[in-house]
């Protein structure tokens, strides 16, 4: 665990050798909140972080989510049972908190013909989760939480990675706390985004917010803490990454008379050397929708495309 100066504390685990997962605890004079709850195996780390921060079970009032992916909501039931805290997240994915079968099917198998239902896939999605807990509060842009002593959190909408995601600005330290609003860029898998335009807009918005809010540092779920100039570099890399995915897909479509969604998924993963798994497929489908909406390609039959 790394402790920061002031009211923000961090618990860390690793999802793989190369992918860390950070979860942040924010403490005011009235109460404390977790920004996300990590994976279910992190509970001892979360409790130890609360101990070191001087946050007793009765002091934890909310889990405020950035987004509702399995590795960000995994300790909700355990934390709620121990502390009585309430769970708040964007309402768009409320069902993913209450119904894990739906979480699994909508996350991993929106294209069931291409992604078989296997015990391994179920384990990958469901093992990080403890138990279903419905949202207590559906929240969106502008939600504010006054934790006391000047510690204040405000939500900013940053969709793209998912169709609904929030970033949290902590006023007293001018810290912006993000989940996956900037995705992993160099991972063995495509971390994925579900709205191309949304992701591009959110990258531009983070850059503006850092300036407008006078942000001094940005905390991420899967990157180390960054100063504003480092964030600018990361945002530029993320924008180049989207462009590379898009231009590779356009080249694949241009290289054959017609291509299927499956061809694009397979071809993109081969060319950019990522694992061919469900997140990549979801991301390719999002790019296809974006290229259709912009009139770059057309759909000649179901899930078969050509350049216009
Ligand atoms: Zn995520």
Image (cartoon, grey):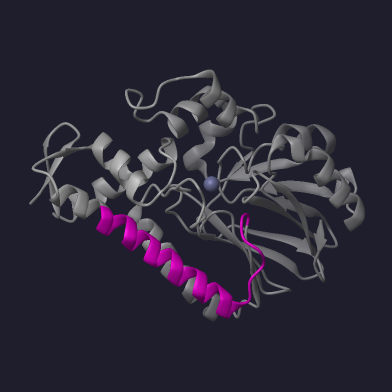
Q: Residue 209, percent across and down?
A: 52, 73
Q: Is residue 281 visible?
A: yes
- The rendered magenta stretch, by its main secondary structure, is classed as helix
Which residue shows up at 80% across the image and 61% down it? Answer: 2
**Rendered view: 217 above or below 106:** below
Which residue shows up at 58% across the image and 51% down it? Answer: 66
Camera-side residue: 116 or 47? Answer: 116
Which residue shows up at 39% across the image and 47% down it? Answer: 194
Q: Is residue 213 visible?
A: no
Please check the rendered image and state whether residue 196 is part of the magenta-colored stretch, yes or no.
Answer: no
User: How many numbered circles does the render carry?
Assistant: 0
Residue 305, by quadrant, is: top left
Residue 282 appears left or right of 73: left
Which residue shows up at 46% across the image and 34% down it? Answer: 107
**Rendered view: 109 above or below 256:** above
Q: Residue 133, percent across and down?
A: 65, 30
Tell me the quadrant of the picture where the N terminus can be found. bottom right
Range covered by the magenta-colored residues: 221-248
Q: Residue 131, percent across and down?
A: 68, 26
Q: Residue 139, percent across and down?
A: 56, 49
Residue 204, by quadrant, is: bottom left
Camera-side residue: 209 or 220? Answer: 220
Camera-side residue: 67 or 149? Answer: 67
Camera-side residue: 183 or 78? Answer: 183
Residue 86 appears left or right of 156: right
């Amino acid at each position: 665990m790394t402790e920061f100066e002031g009211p923000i504390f961090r618990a860390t685990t690793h999802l793989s050798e190369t992918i860390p997962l950070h979860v942040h605890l924010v403490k005011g004079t009235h109460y404390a909140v977790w920004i996300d709850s990590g994976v279910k195996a992190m509970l001892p780390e979360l409790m130890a972080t609360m101990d070191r921060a001087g946050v007793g079970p009765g002091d934890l009032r909310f889990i405020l989510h950035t987004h509702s992916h399995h590795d960000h909501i995994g300790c909700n039931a355990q934390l709620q049972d121990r502390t009585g805290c309430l769970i708040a997240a964007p309402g768009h994915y409320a069902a993913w908190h209450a119904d894990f079968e739906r979480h699994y099917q909508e996350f991993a198998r929106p294209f069931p013909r291409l992604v078989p239902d296997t015990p391994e896939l179920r384990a990958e999605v469901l093992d990080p989760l403890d138990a279903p807990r419905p949202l207590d509060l559906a929240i969106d842009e502008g939600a504010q939480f006054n934790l006391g002593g000047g510690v204040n959190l405000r939500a900013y909408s940053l969709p793209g990675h998912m169709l609904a995601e929030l970033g949290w600005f902590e006023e007293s330290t001018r810290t912006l706390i993000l989940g996956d609003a900037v995705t992993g860029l160099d991972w063995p898998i495509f971390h994925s985004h579900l709205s191309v335009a949304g992701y591009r807009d959110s990258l531009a918005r983070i850059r503006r917010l850092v300036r407008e809010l006078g942000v001094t540092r940005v905390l991420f779920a899967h990157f180390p803490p960054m100063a504003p100039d480092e964030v600018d570099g990361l945002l530029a890399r993320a924008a180049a990454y989207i462009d590379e995915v898009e231009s590779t897909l356009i080249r694949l479509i241009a290289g054959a008379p017609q291509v299927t969604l499956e061809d694009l998924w397979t071809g993109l993963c081969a060319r950019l050397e990522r694992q061919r798994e469900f997140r990549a497929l979801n991301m390719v489908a999002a790019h296809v929708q974006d290229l259709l909406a912009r009139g770059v390609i057309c759909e000649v039959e179901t899930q078969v495309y050509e350049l216009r």
